Every structure is written in C-alpha cells, then in structure tokens.
Amino acid sequence: MSAIEKQRHIIDFMLASLWRRKGKNLSLVVVYTFVIFLLASVMFFAHAIKKEAALILRDAPEIMVQRLVAGRQGFIPESYIDSIQRIKGVQSVTPRLWGYYYDGQSGANYTLMVNADLKDRPGEIIIGKGVTLRRATTEDKIITRKNDSIPFKTYDGSYLMLQVKGVLPAASELVTSDLVLVSEQDFRKIFSVSKDHATDLVLEVRNDKELSTIAAKITQLYPDTRPILRNEILRTYDAVFDWRAGVIIVILAGAFFAFIILAWDKATGLNAEEKREIGILKAIGWETSDILLMKFWEGAAVSLSAFLMGILSAYLHIFFTASALFAPVLKGWSVLYPDFKLTPFISAYEIAILFFLTVIPYTVATIVPSWRSATIDPDSVMRT
Amino acid sequence: MPGRKSDLFFIYLLVSTLLIGLMFVHAGVREHLDMPLLQERAEIVRVLGLSDLCLFTEARYTRHPSLADLGTPFQDHPMALEHFPSGALVPVPPHLKQRTRN
C-alpha cells in the first residue's frame, strides 16, 4: 500500500469516526469558526482602516497651531501670523476657520469650515453626504439637494438661510460626511467671531525635517499656543485603531477563554469511547504512529475547516457588508455616520499569525492525549 | 474509488484554499481599483486642509481626536465625566501623553 493510499485510508476512518460523534464535533467546528471569524474581523478592520487613514491623511496640514485659553482651545489672533511667518523654514501661514454646529432639527453635529472657493459668495454652502440626510431622520425621509436652503441659528439668535450649492463626492464621505463649507462672512456671522481671529493656523514648511524645530520655536514665541504635527495626526489614528481592536478583543476575551477551555477539554481529554476505540485499533494491528496520524488528521480537519471558514466569512463581513456587526459599536450616539466601504488591505503576515495561534495549538493538543492512550496496553485500555 | 470521504475532504480543502487565494486576488484587484478613489480622498484632505477622519460626530474630541486636548472630554462642567460611547473607543492621542510626561 502506497504512503498516499495509507493516508487516505486513515483519513477515511478519521472522518467516519468524527461523523459518529457529529453533534459534538459539528458544534465545536461552529463555535471554533465563530471565534476565528471574530478575531479575523477585528484584524481585517483594524489593518484596513489604519492603512486607509495613513493614505488619506498623508497630505493633512504639516503643522497646525492652536491657542489654548484656560485649558481650552480658543480663537487665535491673526496678529500671530506675521511673527510665525518670519520663523526660518516656514513657507506659509494660513488662518483656518472652523467649528462645530449642532443642528436642532436633525440632532446632528456638523463641522462648519470656511472654504476659499466661497470667498465672495455669502449665503452659499457646500455640504457633505451625511448632511444631505439631515431631514431623512424624520418620517419624511427628505434628502437635502442642490439649491435647497438650510437654516443656521446664529449666536445672536437670528437665523441665516444658506443655500446648498454643491454636495461633496460620496467617495470622500470618510473625511467629509459632516462637513459644511461656508463663506468667511457667514461663518463669522453664525459664530460671532471677530474679524481678527481664526480657529487655528495651518503652516507649510520647506523641509519636513525642520517640523519639530519650528514647532518648538512657535511655543517659545507664543507659550499659549500648541502646535500639532502631521505625524502626530497619523500616530493618533494608528493608536485609535490599535486601541479599538484591543477593546473589542478584551470585550470578547470571556468568550475566547470559554472556547479555549471547551477546545482544550475536547482535544486533550479522551472519553471512554475514544479510549476504547484506540484500544481496539491497536488490538487489530494499528501501530501507535498510525493512531497518532489519525489524531493529527482529526485535529487538522477540525481546526483547518474552522480557520478557512472563519477567515472567509470575516472577509465577507468587513469588506462586503461594511462591518455590519461592528457598526452599532462604532456609531455610538452619532447621528451622522459615514457609510463607507473599506478597501481590502489585508496582511498575509497577520493571517499567518492567526493560523499559528489557532490551528497549530489545537492540532498539537489533539495528538498528545492520544499518544498517552496509544502507548498503553490495548487490553487495559479496552477494560477501562 | 469515487465518493470516498477522503476525496470529499480533499475537495473541500482545495475549494476553501482556492477561495482564500481568490480573497487575496480580490483584495489586490480592489486595492488597485480603489487607488484613484483614495487619491481623490487624499486630495480633498489636502485642498480643504482637513486633519481627521469623520468617524464619530457625537463629541468634538472624538470628531477631531488629533486636535483634542486632555481636558476636552471633561470640560462640560466641574467634576464632569466623559460620557460619550465613542470616548471609550478613542484613546488619548500619543502626542498628548508624551507632552504630559514632559
């Protein structure tokens, strides 16, 4: 009998043996698959969104300068611009005007931002995809379209009707969903911001290597300011998604440990029937190595099936259903939430780690107790 | 011998492995096709001067985590506690922790 034929016979026997205890084994595969599905979903989500954030935010402002007033971010006087502009290496300093606006009608928070394209066009706005749904939360399901008007309550109590002149592309929802681009005049009117103040300053720098030196000079010049560098933004998002993946794993840790105990118990503790089976096999002439081989295939069949199905279903979950199971956790109380589909950036390295952490331990754990039973005298095993 | 259990097992393994292979192919193709879209998003970020992803709009320190400071989540009133669900999902930005240590 060729080696391959021998393996096939052993696999035939192993599958028949698994099928005899199908209830127990199928439920183990289902739970095992679910655990791998959850782990792989977290892994796929975190990796894809981190990669996407890094790609999208690579052109974020190089340095942003905020002013702190009594521990809070306050408006920065535009008089700071000239002296910051004179710092060696600074190419340009642009005041930025932006703020948060709570829309009482929809209960959503918008980010209002002044856009240079609307410079001499007061009364006009460009909105993000999420803002077009501001009335869709009511029973009418009305979508705000181009040329519709949106009322904004100003800080002096009056209302300002601003006409929608454009909607930002749906593809950019991940960064623009809650954005309302307004003219400088309207922004200052809504928030009563004086003409000589901005929300923060955005700097362009000639040489990337000088960023931290320039930031240090700014804080020296104006101790009430706080410069934020682009790489700090990128590191923030790395941390956000590492943390979030960690939080989900901690929440699921109880379930994982319950599964590990179940799998360990199933894999390491042979019941009387399984011991008797090993005894009979040895009595009819099976070698210890054949029994170990059979148990190896048994462990591999269960764990490999669960692994393959778990990975595939996690991929479908994250990249085809837009992380449907995680969405309620991620949305929180947000009324506006971008409906974005992630680009499937997957890492073969991470999948390999998951493989070595799930398939290998289970397979090894199946072999060890069988080796103990298989080396005992068949007669005594059958009598127990 | 057709219809042997081992045959079915190997066919199952082969199909699943092929599907995993297809998953990598699909990811590669989508990555390639989505690149212009990602570049468009990066361009919008550059043109509008945006600093953060629009992930959580419920609180300002989770809408723009990179611009937040340590006091923001607790500044609603004296003894205020951070209470937004997304606050539990967004950690303190690393640069704020560093500054605190300095």
Image (tube, helix red, strand yellow):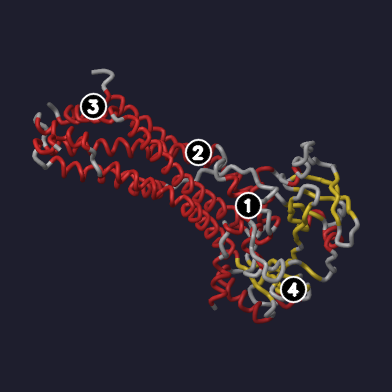
Q: CA distance from mark 4 to mark 2?
A: 46 Å
User: Do the residues at discs 3 and 4 belong to one chain?
Assistant: yes
Residue B40 in percent (x, y) is at 64, 47
Q: Which element type, helix, strand or loop, lies under badge 1?
A: loop
The answer to whether residue A204 is seen in the rendering is: no
Q: Which residue is mark 1?
A: B55
Residue kind at label 4, given as amino acid type? Ile
Q: Which residue is mark 3?
A: A12
Q: CA distance from mark 3 to mark 4?
A: 78 Å
Which image quarter: residue A84? bottom right
Q: CA distance from mark 4 to mark 1?
A: 31 Å
Of tags 1 and 3, the one toward the viewer is 3
Q: Which residue is mark 4?
A: A81
The reply to whether the C-beta atoms of the residues labelled 4 and 1 are less than 8 Å apart is: no
Residue kind at label 3, given as amino acid type? Asp
Dot 3 crowding, Cα within 10 Å, few <14, some 14–19, many 20+: some
Dot 1 crowding, Cα within 10 Å, few <14, some 14–19, many 20+: many
Residue kind at label 1, given as amino acid type? Leu
User: Do the residues at discs 1 and 2 belong to one chain?
Assistant: yes
Q: Chain of mark 2?
A: B
Residue at 38% in and 45% down: A259
Q: Quadrant of the N terminus of chain B?
A: top left
Q: Chain of mark 1?
A: B
Is B19 in front, or is A62? B19
Residue A61 in percent (x, y) is at 65, 62
Q: CA distance from mark 1 to mark 2?
A: 26 Å
Q: Chain of mark 3?
A: A
